[in-house]
Amino acid sequence: RTRRSAPDSQCGLRSVLLQVRDLGLGYDSDETVLFKYCGGSCPRARSNYDLTLSNLLLSGRLPQPAPGEPWHSVPCCRPTHYEDMAFLDNSHRWHKVEKLSAAACSCA
């Protein structure tokens, strides 16, 4: 018998309602926006690149990464497309921020 992952644990698009000021981009706006992001796990089946990178890291044939820059030899859930977002600030000016929110996700 195999265990099935919960649907939310798979790599996919997630969303949360936030005030623009909570995005941390310096805009003074009380407007609420739907911020979309990628989350979840990626399948354990890895590409030949992932397998080779893991083997080379384990054997010491690759130079060690700089501190704080670890090698990633497993796929991670990342945006593949982005959406722009427009909102009104508290001074009644429109702002458009390009590629602010994820539109699609994939394991990369």
Image: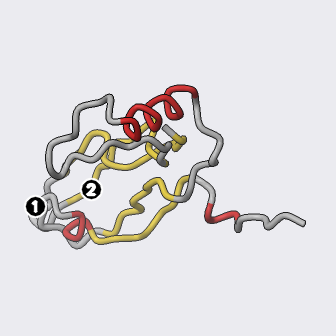
The part of the image, by quadrant, that contains residue 46 is top right
Q: Residue at x 53, y 42 (%)?
A: 107
Determine the secondary structure under disc 1. loop
77 w.r.t. 59: above or below: below
Tag 1 residue:
26
Q: Position of residue 56 (x, y in %)?
A: 40, 31
Q: Position of residue 98 (x, y in %)?
A: 27, 39
Q: Residue at x 32, y 29 (%)?
A: 61
- Disc 2 marks which amino acid? Phe
Q: Of tags 2 and 1, which is closer to the observer?
A: 1
Q: Position of residue 68 (x, y in %)?
A: 18, 52
Tag 2 residue:
87
Q: Residue at x 63, y 48 (%)?
A: 43
- Disc 1 marks which amino acid? Gly
Please state if 93 lies on the left or on the right of 79 as rendered: left
Farthest right residue in view: 1
Mark drawn on residue 86: none
The part of the image, by quadrant, that contains residue 35 is bottom left
